Amino acid sequence: MADLRGGLIGCGFFAINQLHGWADAEGAAIVAICDRDPARLKIVGDQFGIERRYADAKAMLEAEELDFVDIATTVESHRALVELTTGYRLPTICQKPFAPTLADGKAMVSAAREAGVPLMVHENFRWQSPIRAVKAILDSGEIGTPFFGRVSFRSGYDVYAGQPYLAKVKRFIVDDLGVHVLDVARYLFGEVASLNARTTRVNPDIAGEDTATILLDHENGVTSVVDCSYSSKRPVEQFPETVLEIDGSEGSVRLEQGYRLVVRGKSGNVDKDISPPVLPWASKPWHNVQESVAAIQQHWVDCLKEGAMPATSGDDNLKTFALVEATYAAAASRQPVMPASLLWRQSGCTHPQQLPTAG
Ligand code: NAD
Ligand code: 89V
């Protein structure tokens, strides 16, 4: 089968990783790019040898014969672009955060469903190989039934240098990073019945919160803590690692700083380095994120070829998004909150967008 032909919208900071990932992907290639900033279009087009360049997304969709579109712009443009691409019946990938509001996210999922095309959110953290290794241990039953988990991302890295818009947003760490860490908690421990949360701003030079501590009750009885910080001055900086601690009825598993996997399980103890590969185009410390970008994009190609729904479909990501919203609500009210995704299900909806006022 010929390579699937992709068009990429948004040639900014992170799109470079996506374009490297596409260059590595088996079965797909990016044949056209779009950015409203001519400087970015030239830099990125020249770097990746892509000659077909557009300042306007609609112009690209009109002119090109595409099999899918990858949207790598920031969140405020996501709804309009997803509605545009799905209007052309094009399978679409959208970067995280998926949408500005849950209502927007539900509308985007509806647009894709009505068009009959797959929609995947580029929620890549669960595609990091160390996190997948821990998931495989849980699924194998090696530590029995998990009852406690901690999913933690604490850093003092200057994330604002590469992504200056992050210093200006009123909702920062939960929207931008917490969405990844909450998605990992869902991936490892399943859906959430209720949560409570506290957020603070430590850095006086930014507009939004830069720490969050979230206590989650999972439906299967696991209690987990999700904590994130961009104001943690640690002896050894761990950006952008997520560390894990999980206790089960018959053992425990840890993913410690430096990608050290420590397991006490039914079949004995393990203590080993499971560092992700540094892909030829990648650079430390971003290599774990870069590896996950290549993996999720290959997953998309494989799903498109097989007619399968991607793991982080728009539908799936609305459940993670509901945890983000519940976190802000709990932090504001200082009360436990039931995520909207649970309310949708309790109302008998098979798809969250069937309940337009929820969330
Ligand atoms: P950026 O501002 O550097 O790049 C966005 C680009 O999109 C800009 O060049 C801008 O001109 C272009 N653009 C915006 N709206 C457009 C439109 N309507 N049509 C054409 N071009 C348009 O942003 P970034 O830092 O690259 O982030 C992009 C997205 O990627 C964000 O949503 C961010 O949260 C996400 N991100 C994800 C990860 C991850 O690990 N998944 C990491 C970093 C960033
Ligand atoms: O996802 C993001 O936008 C990035 C990072 C991976 C560092 O969290 O900010």
Image (tube, rainbow, N blue to C red):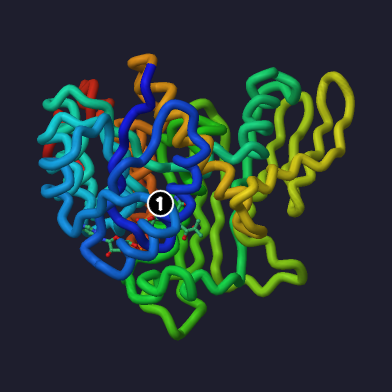
Across and down, in percent, residue 231 comes to: 57, 73
Residue that numbered label 1 is attached to? 49
Q: Report the quarter where the C terminus lies.
A: top left
Q: Is residue 355 visible?
A: no
Q: Quadrant of ligand 1?
A: bottom left
**Is 102 or 82 nearer to us in this picture?**
82
Helix, strand or loop status at disc 1:
loop
Q: Quadrant of the N terminus?
A: top left
Where residue 129 appears, as percent x and y from the top left, is: 64, 37
**Please, what is the three-letter code of the amino acid marked with disc 1?**
Gly
Q: How many marks?
A: 1
Whole-percent x, y for residue 263 in the image: 81, 34
Q: Position of residue 110 (x, y in %)?
A: 15, 32
Please determine whether, in this image, residue 198 is positioned above or below residue 193: below
Evaluate whether residue 193 shows in this view.
Answer: yes
Residue in view at x 70 percent, y 19 percent:
141
Q: Nearer the viewer, residue 138 or 274?
A: 274
Relative vertical location of residue 47 with respect to residue 274 in this rendering, above or below = below
The image quadrant that residue 63 belongs to is: top left
Q: Is residue 251 left or right of residue 345?
A: right
**Image point (17%, 50%), residue name:** 57
Q: Quadrant of residue 306?
A: top left
**Residue at 46% over, 56% down:** 177
Which residue is the extreme one toward the bottom?
204
- Asked which quadrant contains residue 13, the reply is bottom left
